[in-house]
Amino acid sequence: MTSGINQPDPIAVWHDALDESLALESAAWLTERQLERGIAFGDRPLCTVLRPRLMRQAEYDTLRGVCAELLGAFRTAGEAALTDADFRTQFRLADWEETLLESAPRLHVTSPLGRLDAFIDPTDGVARITEFNGETPAGTAYCDALSELFLAMPAMRPFARKWTVRPLPARNHLFNVLLDTWHQFRGVRTIPSIAIVDWHDVPTVSEFQLSRDYFESMGSECIITTPDALTYTGGNLRDASGMVIDLIYKRVLIHELIEECGLDHAMVRAVVDGAVCMVNPFSCKPLHKKASLAVLSDERNNRRFSGEQLAAIARHVPWTRVVEERHTTSDGRDIDLVPWIGEQKDQLVLKPNDDYGGAGIVLGWEVDSATWEIAVTRALSEPYIVQRRIALPSEPFAAVVDGALTVDTRIVDTAPFCWDGAWADGMLCRISTSTLVNVTAGGGSTIPTFVVEPR
């Protein structure tokens, strides 16, 4: 996914035009606008650098094609998980997740909203997928809002004189998928009332406000609420204000909802009864598990996928297995998995099957042997995956630090938004100086992505 020989480098063009005066002006402007508009993660501005992600059209088209290929494989696995209980055991669902999977109505796709988190290999330009967020893919409203700011930022002016700059809006897709899911769920063409549901103290509440404002501008009544504020009586789910809720744009994580509120919670009962449409539904859980990547790449499941899907998996999904006592294959060789994990520490990463924000992840090459051994033992006692280390790409980014312009190299994460389980458009892009590229973990910054071409 390189931009080609003898092509102008948009990153170099951007930085060449950014002198210290323009950088200082842009940094002050960007910080002030972010705080004014609530583009923040908690109390800190979401973006701290002065350059967006710049992609050529060919690069972006290739990435979308990769996503379409892989989403077909995920769709195959997700549909099989809903109908084949034996196959579903590979995803390592909890008992309560099995209960919800069997009891709640299913939507036309398991994950109408998704996000493929990837890194573009700096040596061969191949996108390697490290996670499929099939439950609560955040970032659409933040990315749209940041795009609007960067298009108007002083540093954009000299670049835009020589390059066309196309943003990648995502809230329109989000709204359309929510509406289409509602129409297919209820069989009507009405506009539903929408509730954005999460805990009151989450740092992403500012994104909920941006989403609410957009939904309302499109003609939908929308509220931001919490699980504690919901009641279910007379076949209606209501907020504390009394508003009847048709559709839940679910941002609360399912496992946190059940841990805090139980299976008898009003929201859970309303969804199970079919009184309300929830996106994403309970049936998203198998694909959201990190074990879904193990399911795709495990030789035991080859017969379930087409030749084209297997080729896409082999090229774009790093070798991944659920941590358990078994024999499997690696690079065509039979291995005894657990001893092999112990021997290959520097080439492997351990990840909990269902967590977020980098919690519980152990990078083998960054810990000593004793710590790795403890991590492997823990991974055998609770659902974990092991995944092969991949090469991480980096790019230079300008920023103002201590009142001066600096250009530092940062690791770049590429996370396209996925719609209806079938296609991708728009993306979340996070950058970091840390190997763990995650804003929740405190180690990164979010930037907008633009498709650019010379004028």
Image (cartoon, rainbow, N blue to C red):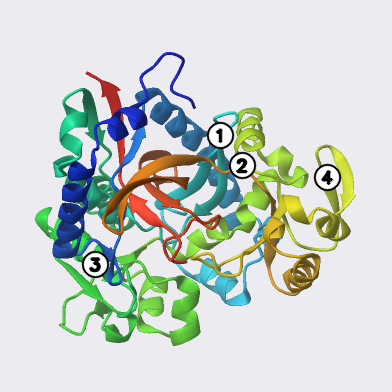
Residue indicated by mark 4: 329
Left or right: 89 in relation to 162 = right
Examine the rendered structure and indicate whether residue 224 appears above or below residue 15: below
Mark whose residue sits in front, 1 or 3:
1
Q: CA distance from mark 2 to mark 1?
A: 7 Å
Out of 207 and 289, give the one closest to the viewer: 207
Residue indicated by mark 1: 122
Q: Amino acid at mark 1?
A: Pro
Residue 267's image quarter? bottom left
Q: Amino acid at mark 3?
A: Ser
Please report whichever mark, 2 or 4, sits nearer to the chain's N-terminal start. 4
Tell me the element at label 4. strand
Left or right: 269 in relation to 197 = right
Residue indicated by mark 3: 206
Residue, x 65% and y 56% (percent of image)? 84
Q: Which mark is residue 86?
A: none
Q: Amino acid at mark 4?
A: Thr
Q: CA distance from mark 3 to mark 4?
A: 46 Å
Q: CA distance from mark 2 to mark 4?
A: 21 Å
Q: CA distance from mark 1 to mark 3?
A: 34 Å
Q: Quadrant of the C terminus?
A: top left
The answer to whether the residues at label 2 and label 1 have Cβ atoms under 8 Å apart is yes
Residue 85 appears anywhere in the view: no
Residue indicated by mark 2: 391
Mark whose residue sits in front, 3 or 2:
2
Please report whichever mark, 2 or 1, sits nearer to the chain's N-terminal start. 1
